[in-house]
Amino acid sequence: MKLFRINSVWRAIRAVIVWSALLLGIYMTSAFIGSFVPANNEWTPSPKGVDIFVETNGIHVSLIVPIRIAGEDLSDLIRLEHLHNPNLYGTHAMIGWGHGRVYRNGETWADVQSGDIGSAILGSDDTLLHVYHVTNPEPQINRKRFRVSEKQFRLIIRQVRMSFRRNANGQSIAYPAYGPDNLFYKSVGHYSALNTCNNWVGRVLKNAGVRIGIWTPLPGGVMRWF
């Protein structure tokens, strides 16, 4: 029996680099295609309904929704007493979903550790919702507003509610985040390179019937539609 031997360290390194580049190329090409192929292509903004937003920091996309409107109320999960300063409780919640270690250890991208990035790429059940309180948001360059019907809004809120992990008493589990106006909440779901923070937003909108790319792992795949 012939044993497998690496005849050259450089050859092994070159093989790793080539295969990594190939996989990255396939991933980026798939993300580009998924971002441009629409789901719910017949959708148009509703003339009556609820205004919501998507916002990006260039890498991460979050969803901004009213906390109380159209018969929906998230205040049982995003609770007033979770904030040290109740005056910061907003009219809207900016909600992002993502990898727990990246969120906890990386207030800025300069703080993100390589081990956390590796865990995020390979996959982890350690996930969090990051919730900022926002009052009367307005459109900005990095924040796009659009209107959904009340039915679509209810479908969006249903998925948001399902993303919260509950304790034995059915309550959401809050942790301090980066400042007095934002919190982490324990979440459900498996994060990976195939199911990213941006894909969470895209999937929530897609499942509610909003026109969006069929697969949106990168921020542009969400933001380009609004």
Image (spheres, grey):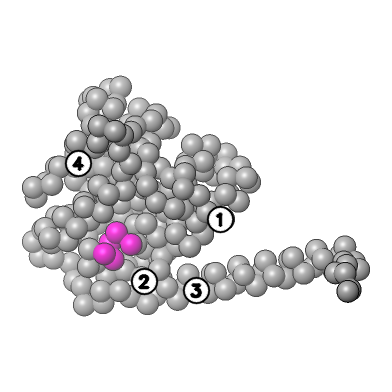
In the rendered image, the vertical position of residue 89 relative to residue 21, given as above or below: above
- Magenta-colored span: 203-207
Q: Residue at x 26, y 42 (%)?
A: 93
Q: Which mark is residue 121?
A: 1
Q: Position of residue 12 (x, y in %)?
A: 82, 66
Residue in the foreground of this view, choosing between 150 and 56: 150
In the rendered image, the vertical position of residue 60 relative to residue 38, given as above or below: above
Q: Which mark is residue 213?
A: none
Q: Secondary structure at mark 4?
A: loop
Marks 1 and 2 sit apart, C-alpha to C-alpha, by 20 Å
Marks 1 and 3 sit apart, C-alpha to C-alpha, by 16 Å
151 in magenta: no
Displayed quadrant of residue 217 = bottom left
Say whether disc 4 or disc 3 marks the residue closer to the N-terminus.
3
> With 176 as the anchor, is 115 left or right in this view?
right
Q: Please name the amino acid that badge 1 sits on.
A: Ile
Residue 57 visible? The answer is no
Residue underneath mark 2: 214
Marks 2 and 3 sit apart, C-alpha to C-alpha, by 11 Å
Residue count near mark 2 (Cα–Cα under 10 Å), binned few <14, some 14–19, many ≥20: many
Residue in the foreground of this view, choosing between 13 and 41: 13
Q: Which mark is residue 30?
A: 3
Q: Which mark is residue 74?
A: 4
Q: Secondary structure at mark 3?
A: helix
Q: Main secondary structure of the magenta part?
A: helix
